[in-house]
Structure formats: structure tokens, C-alpha cells
Image (tube, coloured by chain):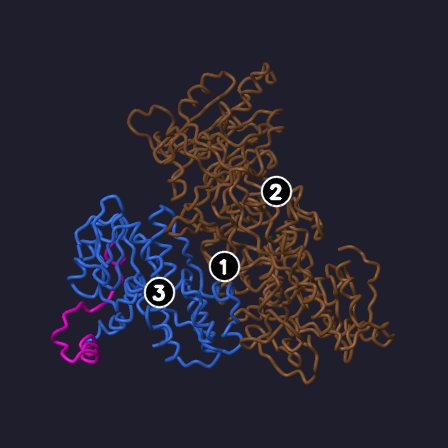
Chain colours: A blue, B brown
Amino acid sequence: MTATANPERPRLGVFKLTSCDGCQLTLLDCEDELLLLAATIDIVHFPEGVSPARSEGPFDLAIIEGSVSTAEQLQEVKQIRSQSRVLVTIGACATSGGIQALRNFVSGEEDGFDEFRKAVYARPEYVDSLATSTPVSQHVAVDFELRGCPIDKRQLLELITAYLRGRTPAIKNESVCFECKRRGTVCVVVTDNTPCLGPVTHAGCGAICPAFRRGCYGCFGPRESAATESLATQMKNIGRSEQEILRSFRLFTAASPEFEKESKRHE
Amino acid sequence: MVDSGTQVHKSMPRSGLETLLSVLSQEGYRLVGPTISEGAIVFDDIATTKDLPIGWTDRQSPGRYRLEKSGDDRAFGFVVGPHSWKQFLFPAKETLHQATYDESAGMWRQSDDHTVATAFIGVRACDLAGIGIQDRVFIGGKYVDQGYHNRRHSHFIVAVNCLQAGDLCFCDSMGTGPEVKSGFDICLTELDSTFLVQAGSERGDSIVAQLPLAAASQDEHKALLTGLAQCRQSMGRQLDTENIEGLLFGNLEHPQWEDVSERCLACGNCTMVCPTCFCYSVDEVADLGDDPPQRERSWDSCFSQQHSKINGATFQPAIKDRYRQWLTHKLASWQSQFGTSGCVGCGRCIAWCPVGIDLTEEVAAIRVGAEEPVSMPACETVTIAPATEQDAGESTTPIFATTEATVAGVVTEAPKVATLALTMPVGYDYQPGQFNMLSLPGIGEVPISVSGDSDGAFEHTIHSVGNVSEALNGLEPGSTLGVRGPYGSSWPMALARSRPVTVIAGGLGLAPLRGVIRRLLEQAESGSRNGDTEWLRLIYGARHPEALLFTRELEQWRKNPAFRVAVTVDQSTSGWTGNVGTVITFLSRKRIPVESLYLVCGPEVMMLAVVRVLLDAQVPPEHIYLSMERNMKCAAGHCGRCQYGPYFICKDGPVLGYDKLSFLFGKRGF
């Protein structure tokens, strides 16, 4: 796909920081809607899907995937912010620090971060990164955070459409249980004692896992009013060990404040 | 239901159940009944009795549900599962309408209704009561939910008497079961080797006539009566409902609310499985292409933050607030609203709560160390027995029916505040205090009070606080928008005619009061207040001089000798020579006539302080009127979002006498 400049249409920029690209791929995964999207907006910068990349602003809508993990990225997010009218972040990395934020839990320890680097990379000395992985909103003002690991295609389209039309995105901040019940799924906690983070997790995925009789892994991160302590007690009551509870909360959105606090209770 | 005169039990062999299903199927009904899926008995499409959970039963406890072999071959040997019939009558997601303007009909086109006549197989007495309760909500009042109405009228109900109670059942306490008494087409009672069959409607009669029936024996009758009696005695739970409305509202600060909030996940499961919970949200959903935007509704719950959110703030921020809202509504204020409890005693909310919170235990705990019950204000209750047969809805208004208005003029009042004068559809009229729902396709809909009318146009003063209000304020003369209304209560004009009136407004609160002032001045011109001096007073405050509304009109009002106008600002700016200070400081310094009628509108904290000053000055509560604001989406008392104790602010409010509000006003979390 190639992009042609059109001054009439809103300018979209899609940026990537530290991440796996899965959320950006969701945009390409839009297939049917992608042509409509390309006809409605001017995709100015989207290295994953469009060439050539033109990172010069201004942008009417900037979408950032990935966490702030290096000193360069710290500068980059400030640069993007200054060039963008609306800035939204997408995915668990950009909104909470992602799985790579597991290193945040050892960043205070001596050589803790090095241990992580050695475990992951063959030549750790080539890796120059910050000791913590953080969400974009920790560094610049963000207009909307779209959750998920990866994000949900329908929600991404809703977000873009809403900004194009000047409407508030119809994206709910309720628990996954709402979506489970709306689709008629039978609760895995109540029938099977399956550990499930649904009650404390932000909705948006459509409650996929429980529909396949698996508990929610919390990929969309904590919802508002996440009652993690009560849920952890319930997990304990159904026989889960402290280690299992810790690991449940320390996953894709481990560094989100609510999940971080809960996992630390079980260290 | 029509009394068919055949409400006697007949005996049917077990094989007759298969006949019943096939007769219903031949009559064109889709069959939905209990079936096993995902480790539970759920409601789904069925074709034959083989699909039923024959030989299975359920064992339930708080937060736990298990299926077991029952050791017999009963088809209905269980109680209730995670599903209720609500999902078929009030679907979890539904398109309300597409924003296509129908020129010939003069309104936005409603969504096409795809009702498929469905037979519900195995409706228990508690669930029948649940359906009856939702009937009151959706088709029992002034506004009719057309989709619900159509489904309700086309569906056929095969009810089943419960002869065994579950561990979480308490229908006996709620007076809803276990015996099926009315509201069904056919009622079955499953005995050891036969069914008892009873028709409850003409439709039921015609189906029953095709079944292999014989006269019921004395033993069969006796088995029914002993079965029901045993069921009543073996209820797993009990709930003491004695004066429960006054009890819960009299104990809003009971320590048990704190206790339960430490366990409650606010996950919303209890409300989703409840057969009566009816709250829903309404969202604009638009495609990128040229397809018209749609308005969709989906089940919502008082456990979501967005449920009580307006202008970026939420009225129920804490889990404690949300649980208390749910329980006080379900068991208490529901009585005032609908003349019945919102609980049918099915026990679903106990079983399907992941942490096993049991409302019967919570109420029992609140009764321990409880304060005196409060007496509830009289409410306008929806008690109409809904006409579930044919013609309901003809004398009522379809909810969400939106017509088109044109912007006749725009006046900028203050930064981010503008008044749109709208040319409304023919025949439109309103009373001061009422509001309209204004909408822009693809952007959304908001409630806006009517701030007056002049030259045939109706004025709406709008503060840009969100996307919709901002877009509305960006409209130019000649543009069109969607409008439905007027809704809600109005200021007490009859009371205002016979006594002095004091209008107290803060900020944008002058908008819904301007219409009252204009009407009172018009009436005075016609001579009704001859000789009275200063019978009308206005105390109006804004944050700063630039935020004052209707400044030119304020000047005109000042020239009227009978009208005493006082304007004050919290913070002055250069050039301001008027009063400085809040409305409260100003009011406290003035004489407060006891005989005056007080009409108050402004931020809730301001109204609270005003009410305190007025009550201290011995003004009777019934002479103080407030205009309230909550999250209004449907404007018909259906979506549940604007609940305030026993009121729906959209329907019973926004204007309410303080005598009706005093028991709750100022309590945080409502």
C-alpha cells in the first residue's frame, strides 16, 4: 500500500515504541474497513503498513503502540505529542508498560535489570535501555488509552471513527464479566473453580477466554475500581497458591498500578 | 391474560411433553427451553424432549453451581440457572434505530423488528414474576419499548410449578412462588409418572386441546398440593421484607455497607443474571462508510462507573455506593417506582456472585443494630397491569421516537455557553422546567432543559462540556438536529401564582428557570399581581462576571419595579461593580420570607447549602423546589441510569419538591 498526501483529509500517524507490533497489525487486519479508512483519512506515517514513512507532523490523530523503554523513545513521545492534535495509545505496552515491564520489579535491585537482560539476550551489552518500561501516559498527556494485548479490531475502528466524527468513543470501562454475561457464557469461576481475572479486568475483548472455558488472563489490564484484593481472596479460597496468585496479576499488564500492588501482596 | 374458564388441571402422560413441543413447533413457534451447556442448565433452542436436561439437577451455594445426576427421569428436576428469560425479551444488545430520516413519517426510522414468535418452555413462578416486573418497566407506563412489546406479545409461555426448592431459593419470602398463578399460556406440573396440565389463556386452550389429556385423579391433585407445600417449607433462603424500604433508606450509613464493599467485586454479575434488572446504556455506533449511524443499547449495570457518570464525574464512585444503590433499589425503592419488589427470590445473584455475596444475609446483617426506618415520600408508581394481549401501546408514545428541529438562531451567552433557538415540530409545547433530548446522528444525544420560547422558537442554553454539547453549540442557523421531548416535571406554576416567588440560580442553573420568570412576568402584566410589590425576586450567582447568562435580559428585569434582581459573582474582574460573593453568602445576609415559594437550580453543593439556609429560616420543605441532574439516556424511566432513590430524574424529576427529596438529598453516593 502506498500513501498519497491529501491536505483535505485528517492526517493519521501510527508510531511504534517497544512492542511486538501486534496492535499495529490489528489496523492492517481491518481488511474490509481498511480501504474505507484509507479513503477517509490520510495515512501519513505508518511504517508497518505504508511506505514511505513521513514522520513529520502535524497529525490530527496519532496512534502510539509500545512502551517507553529507551531514552530515545522518551524524546520521541514528546516530539509526537507536540505535533499531534489527538494522541491515543494502543495496547498493553503503551498503556501499562507491557510484558517487558516485568523488569520494573527488579529495577531497584542491584544487577536485577542485568539479570533480566542476560536471560533474554545473547549479547546483553548491545542493549541500551531504561531500567523500567513505562506507559506513554506517564510522560505525555494522552487523550485516550485503548487497552488490550492485542487490542480489539472493532474497538480500534470505533476509536478512529469516533475521533473522525467528533464523538466520544463507545468504549466501556466495565469489567469483562459484563461482556461474558451479555454473550450468555456460563461463569467458569462459579461452575468450575477456574481462576479468572474477569471481575477486575477492563472489558473490550468480548470475553473470549471464558467462552472457551478458560479464565480471563487480564490482558486488557485493570478496570476502574478493580477489587483485586477480594478477588485474590477468592482465588486463595479455591486453592490457588500465593505464587499462582502473584503470577496471575504479574503478566501483560504487570506494571499497571492496581495489578502491581496486588502482585506485591503475594511476594 | 384472559380467563379461559378452563383453569383446571388435566393429567397428561409423560410422553405428552413431546407432543406439546411438536404442537408448538407446528404452530410456528421457535422453542426455547432448558438444556445443558458449559456445565450448567441454560436456555437455548430445543427441538425435542431429548434436548431437555432429563435426569439432571443443580446444586447451588453462594458463588457455586454444580450439575448432578438426579437419579430420576424428570425433565424439570432443577431450579434456575445462569440464564433468565430476560435475554429473549430484553436482549443484551439491540439496535434501537438507524439514523435515517423518514420524510413521509416525519421522524427518524426505527430499527426493523425481527420478532420471531417463541415458546418459552419451563418458566418458573419466580421467573414469571420477573417478566411481570419488566413488563411494568418497559410497557407499563407512558412510554412503550416497542421491541419489548412486540416480543412480549408474540411469545408463548409454558410455565412449570416447582415442587422442590433449591438451596438459594426464597420465592416464598417474596410472594412470587413456588406456585404458578397467572401470566402463563400453559402450566405444567411434573409428577412421578405424569404431568398435570393447565391452560391459562385462549392461546393455551387451543394448544392444550391438541394434547393427550385425561381427567386428573385425586392422587395427582394431592401430589400437587403436597409438593407445593413441601417446596415452600424447604426454601434454602429466607428474606424478611418487613418495612424493608424504610429500613434500607433509614440505614444508609450502616457499617454493613462498608463490610460488603470489601468483598464486592463490582463485577456486575448479580445484575446481569437478575431476571428483573433493566438498566441499559445507549451508544451511537457509526461505520466509516456512508452507512447511517446506528444507536445501540446494551445491558448496563449500576456496578459500572459509566452508569452514573455525567460531565466527567460519577455519582457513585465507590464500590460501596454501587452495592448500596443496587440493593436499595432492588429491595426498596423499586416498591415506590413499580409497586412491587425488584427481587423475585430466584437466588441467581447469590449463586453467580464470584465471591458468593448473599443479599439475604446482607439484609439480615443490616437489621442488626439498625436505626429507625424512614418513611418514604409518596411516589407516582407504575402500577398499570400491562395489557399483555393485543392493543397495548396505541395510546402510548414509542420511546426514542425522534423528530427534526431547525436552528433558528444562535446567541453566545458566555464562554462555551450558547443559546440555540429551535424551530420545533408543529404542535410542540413545553412547561418551564422540562427538558428535551437533542441529538446529532453519529455523535450522540444529550438532555437539555428548555430555557424559554420566543417568536415560536424554543430556546436551549447549552454549556459545551462534552462532544455532543460542543457539536450542538457549533451549529449554524438553518442546520437541523434530532429532538424528542418534552420530558420530565415542571416548576409548580399553580403554586407560584398565589404567593411571592424567590428564584435562586447558580451558574447555568438560570437556564431552566428563565422560562418560569418570563411566564410569571407575563401573568403579572395581565394584572394578576396588581398592587403587589417585589413579589418576584431573583438571586443569581456565577463564578465570574463573564459567566453570567442572559445579561441583556437581566438588565430589562431590573427595570421592572415589581421584580427584585440580585446578581453576585464569586470572583470579580475589573469593571465589575456589582455584588461579590457566593449565592449562599448573599442569601444568608438577606431577609428570607417564610411565605415565599423558592425555586432553586444550580450545582448540587450549592442547592444543598441554599436548602440549609432556607430550612433554618423556617421555610416549609414543600415550598422549596429543586431541579436535579443525573445521567439521563432514555428520558422515559426505562434505562435506569438517572435513578435517585425512588425517582427517575428524567420522569419524576428534574423538578422535585424538597419534601420529596429531604430523606436522601445531600447523601453521598446517590
Hey, what amino acid is under mark 1?
A: Phe
For marks 3 and 2, give the one nearer the viewer: 2
Q: Tell me where residue B219 appears, x and y as whole percent.
A: 85, 77
Labels 2 and 1 touching (C-beta < 8 A): no
Residue A148 marker? 3
Q: Which residue is mark 2?
A: B397
Secondary structure category for the residue under label 3: loop
Q: Quadrant of the N terminus of chain B?
A: bottom right
Q: Nearer the viewer, mark 3 or mark 1?
A: 3
- Let me know if residue A132 is in the magenta part: yes
Give percent across and percent down for residue B661.
Answer: 58, 43
- Label 3, label 2: how far apart the Cα atoms are: 42 Å
Which residue sits furthest front? B26
Q: Secondary structure at mark 2?
A: strand
- Whether B254 is drawn above or below B511: the answer is below
Count residues near mark 3 (Cα–Cα under 10 Å), then give few for <14, some for 14-19, many for 20+. many
Above-or-below relation of A174 to B561: below
- The residue lying toward the viewer, choosing from B121 and B280, is B121
Q: Relative to residue B84, is residue A122 depicted above or below?
A: below
Which residue range is magenta in the image? A111-140
Under circle 1, the secondary element is loop
Instruction: Residue at 78%, 77% (x, y): give it.
Output: B13
Residue A102 quadrant: bottom left
* Residue neighbourhood size for the residue with mark 2, other residues' Cα within 10 Å, grouped as few (<14), some (14–19), many (≥20): some
**Residue B204 falls in which quadrant of the image?**
bottom right
Judge whether residue B588 can be spotted in this image. no
Disc 3 residue type?
Gly
* Residue B647 appears left or right of B304: right
Residue B303: mark in rendering: 1
